[in-house]
Image (cartoon, coloured by chain):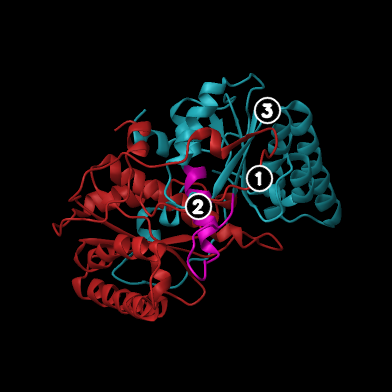
Chain colours: A cyan, B red
Amino acid sequence: MDVFEAMSTCRAIRYLKPDPVDDDLIEQVVTAATWAPSPGNSQGRDFVVVTNPEKKRVIGEAVETVMAHRVAAMERPDRMHRLMLDGTEHLVETLKTCPVLIFVCGKAVYPYESPRESFVWSSIYPAAQNLIVAARALGLGTVFTTFQGTAEPVIRETLGIPEDVHIGCMIPLGWPDRNFGPLKRLPYDKVVHRDGWQGDLRTYPPTYDD
Amino acid sequence: MDVFEAMSTCRAIRYLKPDPVDDDLIEQVVTAATWAPSPGNSQGRDFVVVTNPEKKRVIGEAVETVMAHRVAAMERPDRMHRLMLDGTEHLVETLKTCPVLIFVCGKAVYPYESPRESFVWSSIYPAAQNLIVAARALGLGTVFTTFQGTAEPVIRETLGIPEDVHIGCMIPLGWPDRNFGPLKRLPYDKVVHRDGWQGDLRTYPPTYDD
């Protein structure tokens, strides 16, 4: 599939079929992730691919419990929170039922004297982006989430992820049960500055919709 | 161009021709960047596109000065540093002579009670990755660098970037004066863990070559 077609229709697919995804397709999307750059080509990143139903259940339920507590703690959820909760409700269900959950992890390994914290993130997130666009090109749906933060201790223990390895994102992968694209994005002129910063910082509410 | 072809040949192009890049091509690659996801579709990112020769000169020379100090401070540069310096030497020259320098900036705007620091990076780096792959698809070369850290005060002042906006990366863009691909990456089995972490953390020297 063409690069611009894949990127422009790569919207979050929160509804995924439970049907399995062949190992060779998983390998194709993760291999595409490894092609992303990293500081000095240090490649300080690892991919934890989870297909085990019991492990997905434990992780999904841990996230679900935290979310339920958050909702209970809100006396009167405002509109923002309502939208956020509606958007994530099915995603939590998806964590348990999707065929594949991928965690992109990382550790800064670039041997500068003073490695910058951004090194670890610039190793993880470009790889994750290649992964979701490659999946889209194969007709597979994903959601790029940093939702693992809600239940990180449980996830670390369930998957045995070492303490000094960052978990950058958690990506459900599977055959889509909704359509791809189009995307809702700010227009080009709102986000581009020519030869220097123009105007004030944008302030806008997120749409909770991608 | 096909997604897998573009990603698998998207190597850093440190040698760029000085020939200008049409505005509509710049718009295509930056628009592709805006298609990347962000937490809750918050889109907390801005793109500063620099084509002004004087501003590129000021930024390039500031980075050059810092690098020269670093080299002077090394009594006996070891092999790692030698490789690093060789790899970046021409890149510093490229900052001044490339037709376009793009800074992908960001600010966490997701209205959770406690926004995580990773929000800002997960808004910036996926966009930057779309940008370099889209450029590759159009035949344009880029280098994904976090090199702006060496001269950030000068860059902020030259471009008027607000203090509370992170600069995530600095990407020279232009027509390539070297060939694209192939990439040098660790094999799939070295970076993938199935259903849980396997083995110790990898330790390996980066190759300074991508």
Position of A207 compared to A161: left or right?
left
Q: Which residue is drawn at 62% across and 27% down?
A: A16
Image coords of residue A52 (percent x, y) = 72, 27
Cα distance between the residues tagged 2 and 3:
24 Å
Residues flagged by tags 1 and 2 on a common chain: no
Secondary structure under the numbered disc 2 in the rendered image: helix
Secondary structure under the numbered disc 1 in the rendered image: loop
Badge 2 amino acid: Ser
The residue wearing badge 3 is: A51
Residue A22 vs residue B73, the one in the foreground: B73
Cα distance between the residues tagged 1 and 2:
19 Å
Span colored in magenta: A106-129
Q: Which residue is drawn at 55% across and 50% down?
A: B41
Badge 1 amino acid: Asp
Position of A112 compared to B2: left or right?
right
Mark 1 or mark 2, whichever is nearer to me: 1
Cα distance between the residues tagged 3 and 1:
21 Å
The residue wearing badge 1 is: B200
Secondary structure under the numbered disc 3 in the rendered image: loop
Residue A131 vs residue A112, the one in the foreground: A112
The residue wearing badge 2 is: A123
User: Are there few (<14), some (14-19), or many (20+) residues within 10 Å of tag 2?
Assistant: many
Magenta segment includes A121: yes
Chain ID of residue with mark 3: A
Q: Are the residues at dot 2 and dot 3 in contact (C-beta closer than 8 Å)?
A: no
Mark 3 or mark 1, whichever is nearer to me: 1
Magenta segment includes A107: yes
> Which quarter of the figure is the C terminus of chain A placed in?
top right
Image coords of residue B138 (percent x, y) = 25, 42
